[in-house]
Image: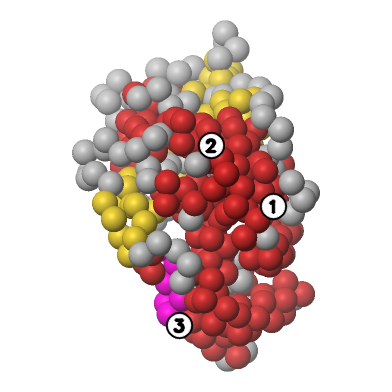
Amino acid sequence: MNAESDVAAVTDILPRCYRIVPTAVVGGPRGTATRNYLAQEHDGRRWFVKVYPPGTDLQGEQEALRLGEFARGSGVPVPAVRRSPAGELVVTAEGTAVSVSEYVDGAHTAEGGLHGCRWAAVGEAVGRLHRALAQHPTGSPRPVPASEVCDVQRSRQRLQRLLAQYGRGTTARGEFAAWARRAAEERIAALPRVAAMLSGLPPVLTAQIVHGDLASPNVLLREQEVAGLIDFRPPRHRSAAWELGRIVLDPRTVLAGPDWPAGLGEAVAAYREANPGLPVEDLLAVPRVAAGYMACSVYPLSEPVDHPAAVTPELERYGLARHAAVGVLTERLDEAEEVLRDRLS
Protein backbone atom coordinates (compact mmCIF):
# COMPACT_ATOMS: atom_id res chain seq x y z
CA MET A 1 0.00 0.00 0.00
CA ASN A 2 1.35 3.46 -0.91
CA ALA A 3 0.95 6.73 0.96
CA GLU A 4 -2.00 7.83 -1.17
CA SER A 5 -3.85 4.58 -0.44
CA ASP A 6 -3.00 4.91 3.25
CA VAL A 7 -4.47 8.41 3.40
CA ALA A 8 -7.66 7.19 1.75
CA ALA A 9 -7.91 4.25 4.15
CA VAL A 10 -7.27 6.42 7.23
CA THR A 11 -9.80 9.01 6.04
CA ASP A 12 -12.38 6.22 5.76
CA ILE A 13 -11.53 4.37 9.00
CA LEU A 14 -11.48 7.33 11.39
CA PRO A 15 -15.17 8.35 11.10
CA ARG A 16 -16.40 4.76 10.79
CA CYS A 17 -14.39 3.24 13.63
CA TYR A 18 -13.35 6.14 15.88
CA ARG A 19 -16.02 8.83 15.37
CA ILE A 20 -13.29 11.19 14.25
CA VAL A 21 -14.14 13.24 11.16
CA PRO A 22 -10.85 14.48 9.72
CA THR A 23 -10.63 17.62 7.64
CA ALA A 24 -7.09 16.66 6.62
CA VAL A 25 -4.85 13.60 6.77
CA VAL A 26 -1.15 14.14 6.06
CA GLY A 27 2.06 12.19 6.48
CA GLY A 28 3.49 12.17 9.99
CA PRO A 29 6.89 11.41 11.54
CA ARG A 30 8.62 8.47 9.96
CA GLY A 31 8.25 5.17 11.83
CA THR A 32 10.61 2.22 11.97
CA ALA A 33 7.98 -0.40 11.18
CA THR A 34 4.79 1.60 10.75
CA ARG A 35 3.56 4.29 8.42
CA ASN A 36 2.42 7.29 10.43
CA TYR A 37 -0.11 10.02 9.71
CA LEU A 38 -1.58 13.11 11.34
CA ALA A 39 -5.34 13.63 11.16
CA GLN A 40 -6.86 17.00 11.98
CA GLU A 41 -10.46 17.70 12.98
CA HIS A 42 -12.43 20.84 12.23
CA ASP A 43 -11.65 22.29 15.69
CA GLY A 44 -7.91 21.94 15.05
CA ARG A 45 -7.37 18.91 17.27
CA ARG A 46 -4.84 16.51 15.78
CA TRP A 47 -4.47 12.75 16.14
CA PHE A 48 -1.46 10.52 15.54
CA VAL A 49 -2.43 7.51 13.39
CA LYS A 50 -0.26 4.41 12.98
CA VAL A 51 -0.86 2.16 9.98
CA TYR A 52 0.56 -1.32 10.57
CA PRO A 53 1.99 -3.22 7.60
CA PRO A 54 0.73 -6.72 6.77
CA GLY A 55 2.25 -9.39 8.98
CA THR A 56 2.49 -7.16 12.05
CA ASP A 57 1.96 -8.93 15.38
CA LEU A 58 -1.18 -7.00 16.27
CA GLN A 59 -1.58 -8.84 19.57
CA GLY A 60 1.89 -7.68 20.57
CA GLU A 61 1.05 -4.13 19.48
CA GLN A 62 -2.04 -4.14 21.68
CA GLU A 63 0.01 -5.40 24.63
CA ALA A 64 2.45 -2.55 24.06
CA LEU A 65 -0.36 0.01 23.94
CA ARG A 66 -1.81 -1.37 27.17
CA LEU A 67 1.61 -1.06 28.81
CA GLY A 68 1.69 2.60 27.82
CA GLU A 69 -1.79 3.06 29.25
CA PHE A 70 -0.63 1.48 32.51
CA ALA A 71 2.29 3.92 32.75
CA ARG A 72 0.04 6.87 31.89
CA GLY A 73 -2.32 5.83 34.69
CA SER A 74 0.58 6.31 37.12
CA GLY A 75 1.26 9.85 35.93
CA VAL A 76 4.02 9.10 33.41
CA PRO A 77 3.81 11.43 30.38
CA VAL A 78 2.45 9.00 27.78
CA PRO A 79 0.07 10.23 25.04
CA ALA A 80 -3.46 8.89 25.52
CA VAL A 81 -4.56 6.12 23.18
CA ARG A 82 -7.92 6.72 21.48
CA ARG A 83 -9.92 3.52 21.81
CA SER A 84 -12.72 2.74 19.42
CA PRO A 85 -16.29 2.91 20.78
CA ALA A 86 -16.02 -0.88 21.18
CA GLY A 87 -12.92 -0.43 23.34
CA GLU A 88 -10.43 -1.63 20.73
CA LEU A 89 -6.83 -0.44 20.83
CA VAL A 90 -6.13 -1.54 17.26
CA VAL A 91 -8.85 -1.50 14.61
CA THR A 92 -8.71 -3.46 11.37
CA ALA A 93 -11.01 -2.45 8.53
CA GLU A 94 -10.82 -3.52 4.90
CA GLY A 95 -7.43 -5.10 5.56
CA THR A 96 -5.89 -1.97 7.11
CA ALA A 97 -4.91 -2.03 10.80
CA VAL A 98 -4.50 1.24 12.66
CA SER A 99 -4.14 2.69 16.15
CA VAL A 100 -4.87 6.27 17.14
CA SER A 101 -3.41 8.39 19.92
CA GLU A 102 -3.33 12.03 20.86
CA TYR A 103 -0.74 14.12 19.04
CA VAL A 104 1.83 15.88 21.25
CA ASP A 105 1.94 19.43 19.92
CA GLY A 106 5.12 21.46 19.98
CA ALA A 107 7.38 18.52 20.80
CA HIS A 108 10.38 16.98 19.08
CA THR A 109 12.39 13.84 19.66
CA ALA A 110 15.52 13.58 21.79
CA GLU A 111 17.60 12.64 18.74
CA GLY A 112 19.43 15.96 19.04
CA GLY A 113 21.02 14.71 22.27
CA LEU A 114 20.79 15.68 25.92
CA HIS A 115 22.19 18.90 27.34
CA GLY A 116 21.44 21.40 30.04
CA CYS A 117 18.31 20.68 32.07
CA ARG A 118 17.32 17.86 29.73
CA TRP A 119 19.66 15.45 31.51
CA ALA A 120 17.73 15.70 34.75
CA ALA A 121 14.35 15.88 33.00
CA VAL A 122 14.94 12.62 31.13
CA GLY A 123 16.44 10.89 34.17
CA GLU A 124 13.43 11.89 36.28
CA ALA A 125 10.95 10.73 33.61
CA VAL A 126 12.63 7.32 33.29
CA GLY A 127 12.71 7.01 37.08
CA ARG A 128 8.96 7.66 37.26
CA LEU A 129 8.40 5.19 34.45
CA HIS A 130 10.37 2.40 36.11
CA ARG A 131 8.77 3.06 39.48
CA ALA A 132 5.35 2.69 37.86
CA LEU A 133 6.23 -0.38 35.78
CA ALA A 134 7.71 -2.14 38.83
CA GLN A 135 4.05 -2.52 39.89
CA HIS A 136 2.95 -4.05 36.59
CA PRO A 137 0.91 -7.25 37.06
CA THR A 138 3.17 -9.17 34.68
CA GLY A 139 5.69 -9.57 37.48
CA SER A 140 7.76 -7.82 40.13
CA PRO A 141 11.42 -6.82 39.69
CA ARG A 142 13.84 -9.69 40.13
CA PRO A 143 17.62 -10.22 40.13
CA VAL A 144 19.25 -11.68 37.03
CA PRO A 145 22.89 -12.55 36.34
CA ALA A 146 24.76 -9.61 34.83
CA SER A 147 25.98 -11.99 32.09
CA GLU A 148 22.40 -12.17 30.80
CA VAL A 149 22.34 -8.42 30.26
CA CYS A 150 25.61 -8.32 28.30
CA ASP A 151 26.25 -11.82 26.92
CA VAL A 152 29.73 -11.87 25.38
CA GLN A 153 29.53 -15.48 24.20
CA ARG A 154 26.23 -14.90 22.45
CA SER A 155 27.66 -11.75 20.88
CA ARG A 156 30.63 -13.71 19.53
CA GLN A 157 28.29 -16.27 17.93
CA ARG A 158 26.10 -13.59 16.36
CA LEU A 159 29.08 -11.65 15.03
CA GLN A 160 30.60 -14.81 13.59
CA ARG A 161 27.33 -15.67 11.85
CA LEU A 162 27.14 -12.14 10.48
CA LEU A 163 30.69 -12.30 9.09
CA ALA A 164 29.88 -15.66 7.53
CA GLN A 165 26.92 -14.06 5.77
CA TYR A 166 29.11 -11.24 4.48
CA GLY A 167 31.73 -13.80 3.43
CA ARG A 168 29.22 -15.78 1.36
CA GLY A 169 28.90 -12.87 -1.00
CA THR A 170 25.50 -11.59 0.03
CA THR A 171 23.69 -8.90 -1.88
CA ALA A 172 24.89 -6.35 0.69
CA ARG A 173 26.78 -3.73 -1.27
CA GLY A 174 27.99 -0.20 -0.83
CA GLU A 175 30.27 1.73 1.49
CA PHE A 176 28.18 1.17 4.59
CA ALA A 177 28.06 -2.59 4.08
CA ALA A 178 31.85 -2.66 3.65
CA TRP A 179 32.28 -0.55 6.78
CA ALA A 180 29.84 -2.75 8.74
CA ARG A 181 31.86 -5.84 7.85
CA ARG A 182 35.08 -4.22 9.08
CA ALA A 183 33.34 -3.01 12.22
CA ALA A 184 32.06 -6.52 12.95
CA GLU A 185 35.62 -7.84 12.65
CA GLU A 186 36.80 -5.15 15.08
CA ARG A 187 33.99 -6.06 17.50
CA ILE A 188 35.03 -9.72 17.57
CA ALA A 189 38.67 -8.81 18.13
CA ALA A 190 37.66 -6.54 21.03
CA LEU A 191 35.46 -9.09 22.83
CA PRO A 192 38.19 -10.30 25.26
CA ARG A 193 38.63 -6.70 26.42
CA VAL A 194 34.86 -6.30 26.65
CA ALA A 195 34.62 -9.45 28.78
CA ALA A 196 37.30 -8.07 31.12
CA MET A 197 35.42 -4.78 31.39
CA LEU A 198 32.14 -6.56 32.15
CA SER A 199 33.79 -8.55 34.91
CA GLY A 200 33.58 -5.32 36.90
CA LEU A 201 29.78 -5.49 37.00
CA PRO A 202 28.00 -6.69 40.14
CA PRO A 203 27.06 -10.40 39.98
CA VAL A 204 23.37 -9.59 39.54
CA LEU A 205 21.35 -6.71 38.13
CA THR A 206 17.69 -5.85 38.59
CA ALA A 207 15.33 -6.85 35.81
CA GLN A 208 11.77 -5.53 35.65
CA ILE A 209 9.07 -4.60 33.18
CA VAL A 210 10.45 -1.71 31.11
CA HIS A 211 9.47 0.41 28.12
CA GLY A 212 11.46 -1.91 25.86
CA ASP A 213 12.48 0.58 23.17
CA LEU A 214 13.42 3.72 25.05
CA ALA A 215 15.61 5.17 22.34
CA SER A 216 15.89 8.88 21.56
CA PRO A 217 13.23 8.83 18.76
CA ASN A 218 10.72 7.64 21.37
CA VAL A 219 11.32 10.42 23.88
CA LEU A 220 9.45 13.63 23.06
CA LEU A 221 10.79 16.88 24.46
CA ARG A 222 9.22 20.31 24.73
CA GLU A 223 11.82 22.91 25.61
CA GLN A 224 13.67 21.37 28.58
CA GLU A 225 10.91 18.99 29.69
CA VAL A 226 9.80 15.51 28.68
CA ALA A 227 6.46 15.85 26.88
CA GLY A 228 5.90 12.18 26.10
CA LEU A 229 7.27 8.64 26.02
CA ILE A 230 5.99 6.72 23.01
CA ASP A 231 6.25 3.41 21.15
CA PHE A 232 6.34 0.97 24.05
CA ARG A 233 7.06 -2.68 23.38
CA PRO A 234 5.10 -5.59 24.94
CA PRO A 235 5.86 -6.08 28.66
CA ARG A 236 9.07 -7.96 29.26
CA HIS A 237 11.60 -8.13 32.09
CA ARG A 238 14.86 -6.43 31.19
CA SER A 239 17.60 -4.63 33.10
CA ALA A 240 16.51 -1.23 34.40
CA ALA A 241 20.14 -0.06 34.23
CA TRP A 242 20.29 -1.09 30.57
CA GLU A 243 17.20 0.92 29.69
CA LEU A 244 18.34 4.00 31.60
CA GLY A 245 21.76 3.86 29.96
CA ARG A 246 20.28 3.36 26.52
CA ILE A 247 18.59 6.76 26.58
CA VAL A 248 20.91 8.91 28.70
CA LEU A 249 24.04 7.56 26.97
CA ASP A 250 22.70 7.67 23.45
CA PRO A 251 25.71 7.68 21.09
CA ARG A 252 24.85 11.11 19.73
CA THR A 253 24.81 12.53 23.24
CA VAL A 254 28.11 10.89 24.18
CA LEU A 255 29.82 12.22 21.06
CA ALA A 256 28.33 15.71 21.27
CA GLY A 257 30.79 17.02 23.85
CA PRO A 258 33.21 16.13 26.65
CA ASP A 259 30.87 16.93 29.55
CA TRP A 260 28.66 13.85 29.26
CA PRO A 261 29.92 12.24 32.54
CA ALA A 262 28.62 15.26 34.48
CA GLY A 263 25.33 15.11 32.57
CA LEU A 264 25.09 11.40 33.33
CA GLY A 265 25.47 12.24 37.02
CA GLU A 266 22.58 14.72 36.76
CA ALA A 267 20.36 12.18 35.00
CA VAL A 268 21.07 9.31 37.40
CA ALA A 269 20.61 11.51 40.48
CA ALA A 270 17.21 12.64 39.15
CA TYR A 271 16.31 9.04 38.37
CA ARG A 272 17.17 7.94 41.91
CA GLU A 273 15.04 10.68 43.44
CA ALA A 274 12.07 9.57 41.30
CA ASN A 275 12.72 5.85 41.79
CA PRO A 276 14.59 5.20 45.06
CA GLY A 277 13.71 1.51 44.94
CA LEU A 278 16.35 0.54 42.35
CA PRO A 279 19.55 -0.57 44.13
CA VAL A 280 22.49 1.82 43.97
CA GLU A 281 24.61 -1.01 42.50
CA ASP A 282 22.38 -0.98 39.42
CA LEU A 283 22.74 2.77 39.02
CA LEU A 284 26.52 2.63 39.35
CA ALA A 285 26.51 -0.02 36.62
CA VAL A 286 24.75 2.17 34.05
CA PRO A 287 27.81 3.33 32.02
CA ARG A 288 29.49 -0.10 32.12
CA VAL A 289 26.28 -1.81 30.98
CA ALA A 290 25.78 0.77 28.23
CA ALA A 291 29.33 0.34 26.92
CA GLY A 292 29.16 -3.46 27.15
CA TYR A 293 25.77 -3.73 25.51
CA MET A 294 26.77 -1.58 22.54
CA ALA A 295 30.06 -3.47 22.20
CA CYS A 296 28.17 -6.78 22.14
CA SER A 297 25.45 -5.66 19.73
CA VAL A 298 25.34 -6.54 16.03
CA TYR A 299 22.91 -3.70 15.30
CA PRO A 300 23.04 -1.92 12.90
CA LEU A 301 25.98 -3.82 11.40
CA SER A 302 23.54 -6.56 10.42
CA GLU A 303 21.09 -4.31 8.59
CA PRO A 304 22.79 -4.45 5.14
CA VAL A 305 22.33 -8.24 5.29
CA ASP A 306 19.05 -8.63 7.17
CA HIS A 307 17.11 -5.51 6.19
CA PRO A 308 18.87 -3.74 3.30
CA ALA A 309 15.85 -1.48 2.69
CA ALA A 310 16.31 -0.10 6.21
CA VAL A 311 19.80 1.22 5.40
CA THR A 312 19.09 4.93 5.10
CA PRO A 313 21.55 7.82 5.46
CA GLU A 314 20.17 8.33 8.96
CA LEU A 315 20.86 4.71 9.90
CA GLU A 316 24.36 4.93 8.46
CA ARG A 317 25.13 8.01 10.57
CA TYR A 318 23.73 6.29 13.64
CA GLY A 319 25.80 3.17 12.99
CA LEU A 320 29.01 5.16 12.75
CA ALA A 321 28.14 7.12 15.90
CA ARG A 322 27.27 3.97 17.87
CA HIS A 323 30.57 2.33 16.97
CA ALA A 324 32.54 5.43 17.93
CA ALA A 325 30.61 5.85 21.19
CA VAL A 326 31.76 2.43 22.41
CA GLY A 327 35.34 3.67 22.38
CA VAL A 328 34.49 6.95 24.12
CA LEU A 329 32.46 5.22 26.83
CA THR A 330 35.15 2.63 27.45
CA GLU A 331 37.93 5.22 27.58
CA ARG A 332 36.14 7.37 30.16
CA LEU A 333 34.40 4.60 32.08
CA ASP A 334 36.35 5.07 35.32
CA GLU A 335 35.64 8.80 35.25
CA ALA A 336 31.91 8.27 34.67
CA GLU A 337 31.67 5.75 37.49
CA GLU A 338 33.51 8.08 39.85
CA VAL A 339 31.00 10.84 39.05
CA LEU A 340 28.15 8.46 39.86
CA ARG A 341 29.76 7.36 43.14
CA ASP A 342 30.03 10.99 44.19
CA ARG A 343 26.42 11.77 43.25
CA LEU A 344 24.95 8.63 44.82
CA SER A 345 26.94 8.56 48.05
Res. 322 visible in picture: no
Q: CA distance from mark 1 to mark 3?
A: 28 Å
Res. 113 visible in picture: yes
For marks 3 and 2 on the same chain, the one whose residue lies earlier in the sequence: 3
Q: Is disc 1 in contact with disc 3, using a CB cutoff of under 8 Å? A: no
Give the residue type at disc 1: Val
Q: Residue at x 60, y 80 (%)?
A: 190
Give the residue type at disc 3: Gln
Residue where numbered disc 1 is placed: 254
Which of label 1 and label 3 is nearer to you? 1
Q: Which residues are magenta?
A: 149-154
Q: Is disc 3 in contact with disc 2, using a CB cutoff of under 8 Å? A: no
Rendered position, 253 above or below 229:
below
How is the protein colored in the picture? Answer: secondary structure
Query: Which type of secondary structure does the marked residue at label 1 adopt?
Result: helix
Mark 1 residue crowding within 10 angstroms, few (<14) / some (14–19) / many (20+): many
Rendered position, 323 above or below 76:
below
Q: Nearer the viewer, residue 248 or 211?
A: 248
Q: Residue at x 61, y 37 (%)?
A: 266
Which of label 3 and label 2 is nearer to you? 2
Q: CA distance from mark 2 to mark 1?
A: 18 Å
Residue 332: which quarter of the image? Answer: bottom right
Residue where numbered disc 2 is placed: 269
